[in-house]
Amino acid sequence: MGGVFIERTFSYSCPSRTLCLELLEKIDEELSLEAELFAELKHDKIVFRVVGLEPYVESAIKKIREYISQFMMIKSINPRNGVSAEQLAKLVRRTIPLDVLAEVLRRQGVRNIILRGSIIYADTDLETIEMFAQHIAKAFDRVSNAGYSYNLKKLIVAAVALYNIGESEVLDMLSEINAIDDKLELKVPWQEALKYIEERLIST
């Protein structure tokens, strides 16, 4: 392929060396580039050197800058000051219902959980929020194509994320207390059904 090979260098100053190292690791793991990337850490600064065909180099630099911007935005999030649904979607690469996340966090002992529109507030760290949001996102992927009502999906997802049980086990327990009809519709609020599942699992 014809074209002009070029080299571009730019730097980014991190708030700390630890954050620099984490950023470099994430870029290496998650960013796919069509140009060669070389990075060197100097104190609290990363010096990037990008080599390749001109359009690929320009594209790579743009991707790296956008990634750094998103990475630092995420690092600045404090759940005590609120996490938006949009920020969560960027973290877990899927939109998840905040009421399910709130219920899961509440049952894990997280305090001061408040939902205000598309923002969740919680007295915990971002890592905890992200961990349970990931569990919820994966569980939703498992039931996304099932013919369940949305509330039943919420219940199954919350139960899977909290107790690592299968959807068939959830359905069996719901049938035991007549909380579900033959059309797989919940007869009770999903939070109430989740409470029963929790009590049932604790007692066994």
Image (spheres, rainbow, N blue to C red):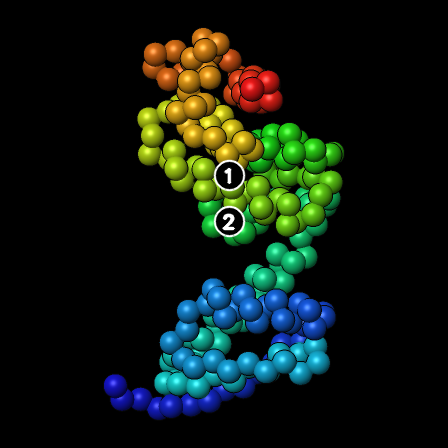
Farthest residue in the top direction? 178
Residue 150 in sight from this viewpoint: no
* In this view, 165 is above or below 17: above
Farthest residue in the front direction? 204
* In this view, 56 is above or below 199: below
* Local SS, label 2: helix
* In this view, 53 is above or below 177: below
Residue 130 lies, in percent from the top left, at 59, 47
Residue 107 lies, in percent from the top left, at 64, 29
Label for residue 56?
none
Label for residue 136?
1
Farthest residue in the left direction? 1
Residue found 47% across the figure and 80% down from its top: 37
> In this orientation, which residue lies closer to the viewer: 176 or 85?
176
Which quarter of the picture shows residue 139?
A: top left
For the C terminus, the image quarter is top right
Distance from disc 2 to disc 1, alpha carbons, whole Å, reads 9 Å
Q: Residues within 10 Å of mark 2 (few under 14, many from 20)?
A: some
Residue found 48% across the figure and 66% down from its top: 29
Residue found 73% across the figure and 34% down from its top: 111
Residue 16 lies, in percent from the top left, at 72, 70
> In this orientation, which residue lies closer to the viewer: 157 or 119?
157
Residue found 65% across the figure and 58% down from its top: 75
> In this orientation, which residue lies closer to the viewer: 5 or 131?
131
Amino acid carrying mark 1 in the image: Ile
Left or right, 10 with respect to 111, comes to: left
For the N terminus, the image quarter is bottom left
Q: Are marks 2 and 1 in contact (CB under 8 Å)?
A: yes
Mark 1 or mark 2, which is nearer the start of the sequence? 2
Kindly identify which residue carries mark 2.
92
* In this view, 19 is above or below 151: below
Left or right, 121 with respect to 201, comes to: right
